[in-house]
Structures are given as C-alpha cells and as structure tokens.
Amino acid sequence: MPDTKVKKSRGAVRRSIRKRESPSSKANGKSALGLVFTPKQELFAFREMMLIRRFEEKAGQLYGMGFIGGFCHLYIGQEAVVVGMRMACREDDQTVTTYRDHGHMLACGMDPKGVMAELMGRKGGHSRGKGGSMHMFSIDQHFYGGHGIVGASAPIGTGLAFANKYRDSDQICLTYFGDGAANQGQVYESFNMAKLWNLPVVYVIENNRYGMGTSIERASSTTDLYLRGRSFDIPGEAVDGMDVRAVKAAGNKAAKWVREGNGPYILEMLTYRYRGHSMSDPAKYRSREEVKKMRQEHDPIEQVRIRLIKNGLAQEEDLKAIDSEIRQIVNEAADFAQNDAEPDASELYTNVLVDV
Amino acid sequence: MPTEVLMPALSPTMEEGKLAKWLVSEGDEIAPGDVIAEIETDKATMEIEAVDQGRLGKILIREGTEGVKVNTPIAVLLSDGEEEDGGAMQSGSKAPSAADTLSSIQSQIRKIESARIDAPTDAPTEGPVASGAADMRDPELPIDAEIESLTVREALRDAMAEEMRRDRLVFIMGEEVGEYQGAYKITQGLLDEFGDHRVIDTPITEHGFCGVGVGAALAGLKPIVEFMTWNFGMQAIDQIINSAAKTLYMSGGQMRCPIVFRGPNGPAARVAAQHSQCFSAWYAHIPGLKVVAPYSAADAKGLLKSAIRDPNPVVFLEHEILYGQSFDVPKQDEWLVPIGKARVAREGRDVTIVSFSRAMNYALEAADILAAQGLEAEVIDLRTLRPLDTQTIIKSLQKTNAIVVVEESWPVCSVGSEICAIAARDAFDYLDAPPVLVAGVDVPMPYAANLEALALPTAEQVVAAVKSVCYTDK
C-alpha cells in the first residue's frame, strides 16, 4: 500500500476520534434546544434503556457461558435511539431493523422471556427457537424483524410503508439500518421509490461509526449520512443519538412530517456501540480509550440518571430500586430460557410453508 | 437498381405484423430518415424510416393488410432515372439479399422511450398451436365447460384481472406493467381497469422493488411482482430467498409472505447469454418457495390464480416463446389448477417423457414422431417444480419402465437431473434402462442462429433418447 494512503487513513481515524468526542457537534447542539422531558418521560426513558442495557449484559454473559450460540450483536450504548424513537411514535407504527435487534424488540414491547428464549434456541422463543438472535418477529407488537442481511430491511420497511399507504392507514414505518448498510444499493433503490410514491417511512440510520470492524471513514466516501437522501429530495437530519431527548424530538418531527403525507424522512443517529460487532469481535480496530471516553462522557443512561438526580426527580435509592426491579425481570427471562426445553424435533419440518 | 423494401422484424420473436399505414405515396421522393410507414404488432405501433435516397416506385402491400410476414417485400424504391417497369422485381432474381435490404430499414418505437435496449420483444398474436394438444381435447379440462382458445399471454392477463377483481389486496408491480401495458403485454388493460393504485410502474431497480413487494406481503397485501424477465430477477434473488422464502420459518410460523414473483424464464430467441437462460433449478432448490412453470394456457391461467391465492411465496416461471401460443382454456372464473400436481398430457405405454414449460413442445412433437413409428410415449407435464409430483412420475414408470426427461436448462444440477435421480432411487426396480436427460447444452447461450439452435434440445434428440431407453433402433 502506498505510504500516502496509510497517512490518509490515519488522518481519517484522527478526524473520527475528534468527532467522537462530541456526538452532538454534528447535530448542531440541537439536543439542548427545547427538549425538556417531563419527570414521567425521564423515568420512562431511564427504565426502558436500563431494561435493554441489563438484558444485553445478561445476553453477553450467557453467550460466554455457551447458552447462546452463533452470532449475537449487542445493542449496549445505542439504547437511546430505539427508546427515543418509540417515545416519538405510536404503538401501532411498524418497526423493522437489521440484526442488532434485541433492543428494538424490547422497546416494541416484546416479552423479554420470549426474546431470551429465542436467543438460546428454546421452544418458548418468539420464533419457537428457529430464528435466533437475528430473526424475531411479532405481529402483535408490529415488529417485522430482525433481518440478517445488511441493507435488506430498507426495502422491506419501504414495503410496509407501501402497505400503509395502499390501505389508506395513517401508520408509519420506522425502518432502521446501520452506517454499513447505508452504502448498500438497495437502500438507494428504496429511497427513490419511497420519495417517488411518497411513502410513510422514517429511515433511521444508526451510525455507530463502524460497519463491523471498518470505520465509517474507511468505508464511506461521504460520512454525513443524513444527506444521503438529497438526490431524492428526502429531508434528513443528524441527531445526537446518545441523548434520548434529542432522539425523541427529532423522531417527533420526522413522524409528523411522514404521517402528514410528505413522504420519507431520514434521521442519522450518531451513536456508539460499546461492545464488539458481534461476540467474537476482538475490537482491535479502535482503542480502549475511545470506548472508555464514550462511556464516561456520553452514556445515554447516565445522562438521564444525572438529570433525574440533579433535578430532584429521583434519589439514588429510587434508581437503584428500578435497576434491581429490571435485573429481576432480566433474571426471570434468563431463568425461563434456561429452563425451557429445546424445540421438539418435529419442529424441524413445520413452518416451511403455510398449509393450504 | 431498384431496391425492395422488406417487412422488418421489430423484435427478436416477431414473425408477422400489420402494415397499418403508408405515410408516403407512389412517386414520392424519399430521403434518409423519412418515416415511410407504420407497422402494428400485437404490442405496439412502430414507424419505419428510410435510410436510402430514392423515389417510391410501387407499393406492394396495401395499408391495412394484416399478417404480413417478416421479410415480405412491401414496396420498391427507385434510384434516379429508374422506372418501375412492373417486371423487374417479379422474378426476384435481381432482388438484393434480405440482409442488404434490411440494413436500409430502421425501426423506432414511437412515443415510448426505450427504457432498456434489450427489453421489449414481440410474439405473434396467434402463434403455432401446440402439437399433440391441438387435435385432441385435453382430458383434464372439465367435460361440460365451455372452451375458448386463448394464448398464454391472454390467459395470464385474465388470471390476474380475475384475481384483482376478486381481492382488493392483490396488486401488481414491476417495470412497464402499467402505461406501457407490459414489456411482453401480459398486463395489457390492467391499468385501465384497476388504476395506478394497483398497477404500479416501478423504476428499473429489481432488488429494491422486489424487497418492497416482500415488505408489503409481510404487511398482509398480496403483491404480484413482475420481473421483465427472470434474468433481471437475479438482481433480486436475495430478497426472494432470504426474505420471502425464509421468514415464515424464521418467525416460527407467525409471519406469512403471500407473494407471486412472475415473468418470462428460459431461453428466448437470439438474445444471447445474459437474456436466454432457465432459472428453474435455482428456485426449485429453495425450501419455503413454491415454484410453478406452466406450459399450456389453461395451466398458466389456473396455476397463476392458485399462486395468487396461495399464502406462500410462489415463483412463477413463464416462457416468452409460449406467450403467443394458443390452447384450449375453460371459460370459467373459478378455473383453478392445483399447485404441486403434474399432468399427464398424453397417455402411452412404452416410455415416460417428463418435461415442463416450453420443452413440452419438444416432448409432444417427439411423441407424435414416435407414435408414427409404433412407440407410444406417455408425456408428463410437471407444471409445478416445487413441490414435485413424484407420484405421477413413478406411477407412469410402473407402466412404461423407461424414462426420458426433457428440459431447456443446463443439465448440471437441474430439475431434469433431479427427476433422473428420483427415478433411479424410487423406481429402480421398474426401470429397464438408465434414465436419460435431454437438456440444453452446458454452455452460455450463443448468439449466432446456428449455434443457438445447437444449444437447445430438439424433438429428434428426444426421439433418439426414447429409442435408446426402449432398446429399439427402428
């Protein structure tokens, strides 16, 4: 490799670290503007994010113990994105995402027991043990997966939005994918059709800075992903995805825009995953300091905790009580899953086709 | 020297057309680029431009004439000083070669921008009637039903129109399905009847619109996704296999994907390697899909209606060359052919010939030739490739003790090779000879006419294969 290329690459990494120091800088400091949560909202966000955090920690632990197999992509660090978006939308709005999906399922209201059992391949899992970490669905909670192919959620979410419009429903579809998928061709094919037909879809790009082990600067010719809809005339916005209030505010605006029939909207959530891409990721592509700094200065849950205490909305003991309540829910989910049976061997052949 | 202007072929499969209108008169001076006439095919009206300079000596085919065969002389162009003497061209001895004359003619699609240079092709409105099926009533058609003769093209359109009338959740999306009326005219008239809410022209982005269709199906709609050809469906194969076929299983039975992916599949005519190939084995390999490949118009209609009603993803493989072929079709709204059931198209005792889609033409033609030589072939049209109706095949082998499989696809890991394996495994004790596969040649499809013909199976090859498994050389 020519020396200049190496230098360029190093420069890019340095730039990205600078950016990481402040996720809100690209979002123009919008997170501070008029985004005051009510005490109830603060507590709700704290609880929901905490559930995802503790659930994922437990999943990581169970993976290490061999209870969970295959690929397992943890959402730790990104909790504010999905929780803020759920707070901005209606319960009957659809959600579809890629494979880092445990947080989305919990935020959509799917039972933690069913999610954990699925992670362990048990019969009580949401997919009866046949989907695993990356493939879960819930018609009742309007959660359409859980898709293992990078970029595949984009046209599927666009199709869900198409169905909303076809039926003259005012539901909207939240279509999530990552910064890695943002370079996929089918994403742009979807953008084009979504705008062409003015479909009610919010594209939520979870930019956690790394597509597996490749930083966005090394994979993308332009890194402002909220501008990627420009050639299609789709408005976009960069959001401090570590601040649940900023996410909700941007989500409200996007949802309103989309629900009123103005067509798609893009939200680029500047976020960060603390863990590796998947459980087998040694994470050599970034420094420990980078992760540590992010945890210390931008943690989405810590931000809410500090506000709750500072504003006198809760005492340390109250939050500890919430935490232990959540640990209880997660432990029960883990117990349920560990004690649940594997699917019956006959399940091998069921659900291949719907019987006619 | 006078030049004959010949009836041009406006597409690879066009055989004839209507000379709709002359835009010049005898005696007119003609310059290169002048539009001299309009020609109608069953799909579109096209203009013919002159490339050579000259004077229109004589119009040989009057306007309004239908069924003008390609390469028929339609006018005579005279150079300076030449007179139309009425005799010069009659013998044809002085006529320039067809190639020379065709080079002086250009055609253009009027008012329609050619979105894709390779796309639209034509087939004759009334194609050849299926051999073997023409002279006898299909035993499977209901005895008391009124019968109409329909092309496969019309049968497919009727199937979609009937299902769209029946169920508002059914819609069609694809390239050129609306205003253009279908690249192969399968969706003709649907936009007028159902509107652009349900007949949706898409951009040329197969991966994307296929995924949009899958998403709509997961939401409970019943999309028909048309691929202009299955060659382009390859762009979308991830969404077909990873999203449509697997979601039911991956969701533990919760999430259905009722969708039909359809379009022409298999070797077409003179379009070479990238546009002339059969994908039957690709999709028949995938659990979670149903795969249908009809031959006759009755099956095309009845199976497409069944596919649209099916709660599963169905890959529906049509054939461009069959679109213009006519067959008997029962005249009834509820003409449904079950998916997963083969059809005995012709009964016989000496050998079983198994085939599907256009290759049925070779099989039935071979059966006619063999019958004249005293060998009675039983011809089975698979119709559905997944799930395979192995029982019908085995039952036939118990009677005939010999099998030849005929298909147009490549022979390696094909549907045909699978049938041979099934016959060897499940009917071994009934067989008097090893199964034989007559398939396309294992090369990318060549362009040259002679090479293309060599790459495809023929009825003669089927006849030879039958004789080999019947141990006869008469």
Image (cartoon, coloured by chain):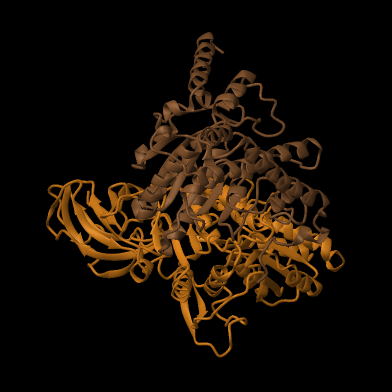
Residue B372, above or below A65: below
Quarter holding residue B193: bottom left
Q: Residue at x 49, y 43 (%)?
A: A186
Q: Nearer the viewer, residue B153 or A136?
A: A136
**Image quarter in which the C terminus of chain B is found:** bottom right
Toward the viewer: B358 or A100?
A100
| Nearer to me, A179 or B193 | A179
Residue drawn at x 43%, y 39% is A36
Task: Judge whether B85 appears above or below B372 on screen.
Answer: above
Residue B398 drawn at (x, y percent): 81, 73
* Residue B298 found in image quarter: bottom right
| In this rendering, position of residue B419 left or right of residue B72 | right
Q: Position of residue B303 (x, y in %)?
A: 57, 71
| Chain assigned orange | B
- Relative placement, left or right, of A316 versus B351 is left
In the rendered view, tell whether residue B393 sits above or below residue A155: below
User: Which residue does the image show at 45% across and 73% down from the upper left?
Assistant: B158
Residue B39 position (above or below residue A146): below
Q: Can residue B451 be seen from the camera position used here?
A: no
Q: Position of residue A27 (x, y in %)?
A: 42, 31
Name the residue furthest right.
B429
Residue B319 makes an appearance in the image: yes
Q: Which chain is brown?
A: A
